[in-house]
Image (cartoon, rainbow, N blue to C red):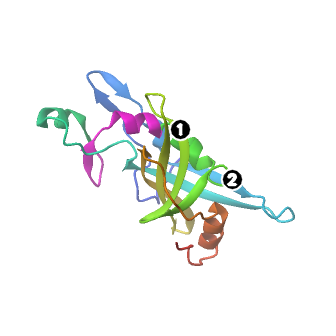
Amino acid sequence: MKFNTVKEVTSWKNFILNDDIYDLSHLNAQWVEYLDQTDEEKQIAYKFIVSYGLHCFTKDSDDVSSEESQLLMYSAPKESRQFNFERYQLSKHLPSIIKSLGEKETLVCHAGYGKFATVKILDSNGREVDYYVAFAVFKEVKKLRLHVQSAYPKYEGIGKVKKVGFFVIAKNLLNNNKLPKP
């Protein structure tokens, strides 16, 4: 699939460390269609181009030496950051989480810099964590776009949030209306 109009990375190169290959193809851009069935008489399909940002699998850390930092550096067109093994493992859940945004089980709520989805998943140690998926929605060359800016585990819980329906967001975006605000 070609996404010539998308202004984000659409095909991530693998990260290689000590001959170990960390495949990032699960974060390549993709089309995702959401079917809004809230009105049984009039179902609406919303088709989004979905892309993922560098922060889904990288994280700056002061806990490593400068040599380790250089070995872990992952360079993308806009910035470079240290590859993070925990975020990488959790990022494997992202495609299915993004596909579930229209489902009632996926909590979509407001965040300070975009929209937010959170789900409970198991981290690499088998602990249940709230996984925050910060994303933005917008139109790009007349197409609906969803860009996952960052995704990271939250171990102290999500606290109080203001929910917003994903289909409310999609409908407003499609109709050029303002997106819901907290």
The residue at the point 57 percent across, 63 percent down is 144
**Where in the figure is residue 12, as x and y percent of width and height?**
40, 42
Which quadrant of the view contains residue 34?
bottom right
Per the image, the residue denoted by label 1 is: 121
The magenta stretch spans residue 105: no
**Where in the figure is residue 47, as x and y percent of width and height?**
64, 58
Which quadrant of the view contains residue 14?
top left
Measured along the vertical axis of the image, is residue 139 above or below residue 27?
below
The outermost residue toward the top is: 19
The magenta stretch spans residue 82: yes
Q: Earlier in the sequence, mark 1 or mark 2?
A: 2
Which residues fall within the magenta stretch? 75-91
Q: Which mark is residue 8?
A: none
- Give how far apart the Cα atoms at labels 1 and 2 are: 16 Å
In this rendering, position of residue 43 left or right of residue 100: right
Q: Amino acid at mark 2?
A: Lys
Kind of element beneath mark 1: strand
Query: Who is closer to the viewer here, 121 or 103?
Result: 121
Per the image, the residue denoted by label 2 is: 104
Measured along the vertical axis of the image, is residue 81 above or below residue 128?
below
Kind of element beneath mark 2: loop
